[in-house]
Image (cartoon, rainbow, N blue to C red):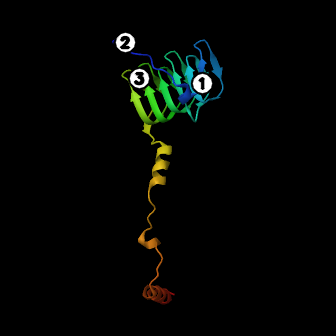
Amino acid sequence: MWGKAKPKKISVEKHGHTTLIANCTSVAGDITFSGMLQVEGIIKGNVTSTEGEIRLAENGMIEGEIKAPNVVINGKVHGDVFASERLELASKALIEGNVFYNRVEMVMGAQVNGKLEHKANKVAERRKEKEKPVVASKKDQAVSSPALKQQAKAALESAG
C-alpha cells in the first residue's frame, strides 16, 4: 500500500544463510559465523565474523565482544563492539563497553557507556596504498655523476 514502509529484504547472496538464536535460547560459549546472525536470546561469549552481519534484537543480550563487518544493535551488549564496516545503533541499544567503528548510525535513545573510536576500514586503506604510484625520493636515487662520487669519497676520507 501507499505510505507504508516496505520491510527490508535480506539478501542471501550478500549475507549467506541466517542463523537465529530465539528469545527463549541461551548460548554459553564463543560463536564464529558467516552470513547473518539474528540474536533474540542471550549469548554469554564472544561473537565473531569476518564476512557477515549480526543483528541483536530488542530483547537480545550479548555478554562478550562482538567483531563483525556489519553490526545492528537494538538490545544489550556487555563488552566491546568492533564493526569494521558499518554499525547501526537503534533506539533500544545499550552498550556497556567501547565501540570501534568505520561508519556509524545512531538513533535517538541509543546508549553507549564507553568510548566511541573511529577506525578506518583496513581493506579500503590497503586498496588506496596499492593504487598510489611509487616515487623515489632524491636521497633514495643513486649517485651517478663522477664529480659527485669524488666529492663523497673526499668527504669520507677527511672524516676518517
Furthest residue to the right?
Answer: 29
Q: Residue at x 49, y 16 (%)?
A: 58
Q: Secondary structure at mark 1?
A: loop
Which label sits in the foreground, 3 or 1?
A: 1
Q: Label 2, label 3: how many angstroms apart (C-alpha)? A: 25 Å
Circle 2 is placed at which residue position? 4
In this orientation, does residue 135 appear? yes
Tell whether label 2 touches label 1 (CB within 8 Å). Answer: no
Mark 2 lies on a secondary structure that is loop
| Mark 1 → mark 2, Cα distance in angstroms | 27 Å
N-terminal label among 1 and 2? 2
Who is closer to the viewer here, 131 or 91? 131
Residue carrying label 1? 17
The three-letter code of the residue at mark 2 reads Lys
Disc with the residue nearer the chain's start (2 vs 3)? 2
Q: Is residue 7 left or right of residue 21?
A: left
Q: Residues within 10 Å of mark 1 (few under 14, many from 20)?
A: some
User: Which residue corresponds to mark 3?
Assistant: 110
